[in-house]
């Protein structure tokens, strides 16, 4: 298995609608590890690692989001070890404090 790491930046109505819990749940289901946090007032950022196919599935799910979300834009790019280190020691995907 080749592990890939990616950063996702999701913009729109994504705060106050359970988006971080949605990411934690879906990442766990897809066996992805990493973290998710709120940024500003209209963005959620996630850094996840796992199999490429699982990251592709996550990207499709994140574009839709939970029921109350209204995703306007999703950016996806490779993530370096500096981003992934924010969840050092955690298993699976964790929700971090907002920035």
Image: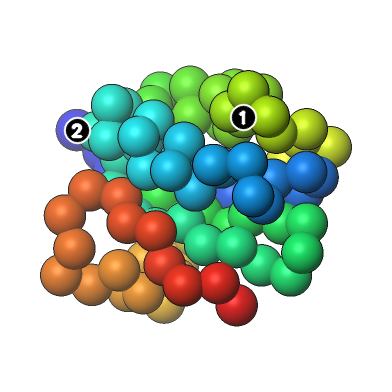
Left or right of residue 64: residue 12 = right
Residue 57 sits above or below residue 15 on the image: above
Residue at the image point whose x is 68% and y is 29% from the top: 68
State the residue in front, 79 or 70.
Answer: 70
Q: Is residue 52 visible?
A: no
Left or right of residue 38: residue 69 = right
Residue at the image point whose x is 77% and y is 64% from the top: 41
State the residue in front, 82 or 41.
Answer: 41
The local crowd at label 2, few if under 14, some if 14 to 19, many if 20 or more residues have their Cα within 10 Å, is few
Residue at the image point whose x is 73% and y is 41% from the top: 74
The local crowd at label 1, few if under 14, some if 14 to 19, many if 20 or more residues have their Cα within 10 Å, is many
Q: Identify the residue under disc 2.
A: 1
Residue 56 sits above or below residue 40 on the image: above
Closer mark to the observer between disc 2 and disc 1: 1
State the residue in front, 15 or 85.
Answer: 15
Identify the image quadrant of the C terminus: bottom right
Question: Which element is circle 2 on?
Answer: loop
Residue 96 position by quadrant: bottom left
Disc 2 to disc 1, C-alpha distance: 27 Å
Identify the image quadrant of the N terminus: top left
Q: Identify the residue under disc 1.
A: 65
């Amino acid at each position: 298995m080749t592990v890939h790491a990616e950063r996702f930046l999701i913009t729109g109505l994504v705060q106050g609608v359970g988006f971080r819990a949605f990411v934690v749940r879906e990442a766990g289901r897809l066996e992805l590890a990493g973290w998710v946090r709120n940024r500003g007032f209209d963005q959620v950022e996630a850094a996840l690692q796992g199999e490429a196919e699982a990251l592709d599935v996550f990207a499709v799910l994140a574009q839709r989001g939970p029921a109350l979300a209204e995703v306007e834009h999703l950016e996806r790019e490779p993530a370096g070890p500096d981003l992934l280190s924010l969840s050092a020691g955690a298993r699976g995907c964790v929700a971090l404090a907002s920035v």
